[in-house]
Amino acid sequence: MPARNIITITTDFGVRDHFVGAMKGVILTINPEVNLLDISHDVASYSVVDGAFTIAQAYTYFPSETVHLVVVDPGVGGERRPILVQAGRHYFVGPDNGVFSFIYEREERVTVRHITASHYFLQPVSRTFHGRDIFSPIAAWLTKGIDAANFGEPISDYRRFANLNPKMESENLAHGIVLKADKFGNLITNFSIALFPQFVQPKAPVFQLEINGQLLTRLHNTFDEGAPGETFVIVGSSGYLEIVCNGASASRSLKAASGDDIVLTFQ
Amino acid sequence: MPARNIITITTDFGVRDHFVGAMKGVILTINPEVNLLDISHDVASYSVVDGAFTIAQAYTYFPSETVHLVVVDPGVGGERRPILVQAGRHYFVGPDNGVFSFIYEREERVTVRHITASHYFLQPVSRTFHGRDIFSPIAAWLTKGIDAANFGEPISDYRRFANLNPKMESENLAHGIVLKADKFGNLITNFSIALFPQFVQPKAPVFQLEINGQLLTRLHNTFDEGAPGETFVIVGSSGYLEIVCNGASASRSLKAASGDDIVLTFQ
Amino acid sequence: MPARNIITITTDFGVRDHFVGAMKGVILTINPEVNLLDISHDVASYSVVDGAFTIAQAYTYFPSETVHLVVVDPGVGGERRPILVQAGRHYFVGPDNGVFSFIYEREERVTVRHITASHYFLQPVSRTFHGRDIFSPIAAWLTKGIDAANFGEPISDYRRFANLNPKMESENLAHGIVLKADKFGNLITNFSIALFPQFVQPKAPVFQLEINGQLLTRLHNTFDEGAPGETFVIVGSSGYLEIVCNGASASRSLKAASGDDIVLTFQ
C-alpha cells in the first residue's frame, strides 16, 4: 500500500518570494520525511479557475493517498472556509472557493470537510497567509497518519463552479470556452473527448470551430502535421480539444485567452 | 532530534539556466541522502537586500539544524569572503556581503566563520561560480556531520547592512523604505509590528503613510475588506506593514518599488 | 556504489502549467522512492540547442547512475524516435533530435537505444505529450533496476548537431557562435578552454573578439574587475569564453543573442 507521504503544492504565489519556502518549512517541521512536489506556483494570480484546471490535470497521475495542497485564495482571511477533500484515492487541502470543482465532477466518492481543528494550525494564524498557517500544517499532519475526521465535520454546501462544461444548444451546436492558454500559447478548450468522442474516431468529424471571429475546420494528430504557422485543432494530452499553431502561439495569433467563447458546430 | 539533512537554496540565478542544477548535483554527489528545497531562485538580480529579506522570511519555519545556502553574490571572485553562519538553531552558507543581515539582527547567538578549508571545495575553483564550487560543497559536508569549526575560524568584522530599520525622527514621525514588492505587487515596508505594536491593537491607530506623493490612512485586516482597486495598509504575514491593493498591484498603482522612501506619521 | 535513484528533469514546458507535475506523478507512481531534481523547465521553447547545452552543463555534477530526463521535443508524435542513452556513468532519456549532442561529443563510451518496449509506456499514449506517457515511465523503470537492454535495441544513426564547435579558418582566426545568453545576459560562446587553453595561461593572449560589429579586447578574471558597465571577456564557469558586462546584461548592451556569429582573432 502506498503510504501517505507525498504532498503536491499548487499556488499562485510565484517563485520570486519567500511564500512557498515558508510553507515547505512548516511542513518539514511537522513531518521531515515527507516528499514535497511542486505542481505549479505560477497559476494566474487570483484565478481560481486556472488553479482548478491545473490540479485537475495533474493529480490523477500521483500515487494513492497523495495529499494535494492547493492555495489559490483571493478571499484569504474572509468568510470562505478552509476545507479537506477526500476524493477517490486522493486528499486535497485548500480554500472552499471552487478550486476543486473539476475533482468533484470527476470523482464518484467525495467527502468535503470544513477544517475547524485549530489546534493543528500554526499559531498565531495570520489574516493573509493561510497557506502557511492553516493549509500547510493540515497537509503535513495528514501525512503523519491523522485521520481526516479529526480535522472537521463533513459539509455538503461546498462551492463548485457551474459552467465548466459546454452548453449543448442542439445536437450539432455547442457553446464552450477556453479553459486556459498554456505556456506554448495552445488554447485548451472545455470540449472534452468524453463529451465529443467523434474526435478520436478513425473517421474525423466535419466540424467548424469559431473563436474571436475566426473559423477553424482542420483536425490534425500532431503539431508537426500542421503547416508552419497554421492554426488548427488537435486532441490534447489532457483529453480536451486544443487550438494550436505549429511552432507558434495560437493564443497570440488568435488574440485569444482564458475565458473566451468558442462555438462548435457539426454538419 | 532533527538531523542535519535539509538544505534550502536561495539564489538570483533564475531557473532558465543550468546553474541551480549543477549546484544540486554537487550536493547530491557528496550526500545523496540530503533533502533539497528551493526557497527562491528569482531574487532580484544582484540584489543582496532582496536576498537578505527572502531568506529572513523563510528560514524560521524550517526544522532545527537546517542548512540554508544563499548565493546572491555580485562580488563573486573578488575580495568578499565565503562565510558559514551559525545563528540560533540554523546554519547559513554564502558570501559575506550583508545577505545575512536580518538574521544577525534577529538571532541572539551568532557565530560567523570565514570559510578557508579549501580541501572541501570542488577543484578547480572557478572565479565566477562559487555557488557550485565553494558554497554547495560546504553545505553538503555540513549535512554529513562535519563540525562547523573545521571549515574556518570565527570572525567579527562580517558585513551587515546598517539601514534595515526605520529612522524615528520623533515619537510620531518615522522614515522607512519599501523592502520589496512581492509577486502580487504588495509593497512590504520595514515598519515592523515589533516596532509599531499599535497596528495590532484592538483600536487601530490614526496614522498617515506617505509614499511617492500619495497619502494612505486606511488599515484593513484582510485584502477583501478593501474596495476593489482601493490601496490601503495591512499587517502583512511577515510581521511588517504592507501597502496593498485589493485584487491589483499596489506597486503599479503607486509606481513604487523596492527602496522607495515612506514617511509614517501618527496624530 | 551510488544507486540508480536520482532522476533529473529538463524541459521547455515552463512551470505555469500541469505538465511537469503530471510527469512527476507518473514517475512516483512507478517508483515512490526516487529523488526528483529539476534542472530547468525554462529551456527556450522548441530550442533543442538550448536544451542540449543546459543538460550538458549540469549532468557531470551528478552522481554515477543518475537518470537524466530531457524533454525538448518540438517533433513529438512525429517520426523522431524515443531514445535511451548510456554515456559514461549516466543515463539519458529523451527524443532523438540532437538534444544529447554535447554528451555524445564529451563521453567516450556511448550506447544509444531506440526505445520500443511499449509495455512500459503509460497507456493510451497521447500524440502530444510523450514526456508524460513514454519518457517519464522509462526513466522511472530504469531507477527500479530494469536493465537498459530491455527497453530497445542499440542504434548508430542517432541525430547529432554538426556545428557545435568553432571553425578554425587559420591558426589565428576562428568563427564561433553564441551558445546562449544566460539569465544575467552573459553571452556563453562555443570557444572552449579545451580548444583555446591560452586563455587560462598566466600570460593572457592578445586577442580580438568581434560580435555584432563591436570589438572586445579585454580579458578579466572576475565580473568586478570590469569597470561598471564595461563589456569584456571572461573564462566562464562552464569552461567557455563568455562575453559579460559588470552589473549589467551584455546581451542587451551588444544586442546579441543565441546563435549570433563571433569572430576570434589572435595577433
Image (cartoon, coloured by chain):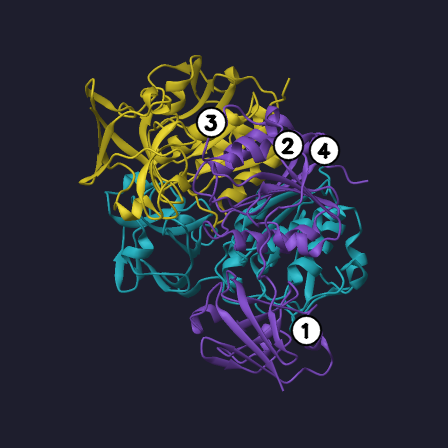
Chain colours: A purple, B yellow, C cyan
Q: Which mark is residue A149?
A: 4
| Mark 1 in CB contact with mark 2 (< 8 angstroms) | no
Please name whichever residue, B252 or C200, is drawn nearer the observer in this view of the structure: B252
Quick check: C139 above or below B236? Answer: below
Residue that numbered label 3 is attached to: B93
Quarter of the view holding residue C3 = top right
* Cα distance between the residues tagged 3 and 2: 28 Å
Query: How many numbered marks appear?
Result: 4
* Cα distance between the residues tagged 1 and 2: 40 Å
The image position of residue B255, as x and y in percent, is 25, 46
Quarter of the view holding residue A84 = top right
**How many residues crowd around disc 1 within 10 Å: few (fewer than 14), some, or many (20 or more)?**
few
* Cα distance between the residues tagged 1 and 4: 39 Å
Q: Residue at x 33, y 56 (%)?
A: C251
Residue that numbered label 2 is attached to: A140
The chain letter under disc 4 is: A
**Closer mark to the observer between disc 1 and disc 4:** 4
The image position of residue C48, as x and y in percent, is 53, 63
Query: Disc 4 on helix, strand or loop?
Result: helix
* Cα distance between the residues tagged 4 and 3: 43 Å
Dot 3 amino acid type? Val
Q: Which mark is residue A196?
A: 1
The image position of residue B39, as x and y in percent, is 49, 36
* Cα distance between the residues tagged 2 and 4: 15 Å
The mark that comes first in sequence, 1 or 2, is 2
Q: Quadrant of the C terminus of chain B?
A: top left
Q: Quadrant of the N terminus of chain B?
A: top right
Residue furthest to the front: A157
**How many residues crowd around disc 4 within 10 Å: few (fewer than 14), some, or many (20 or more)?**
few
Dot 2 amino acid type? Ala
The image position of residue C240, as x and y in percent, is 44, 51
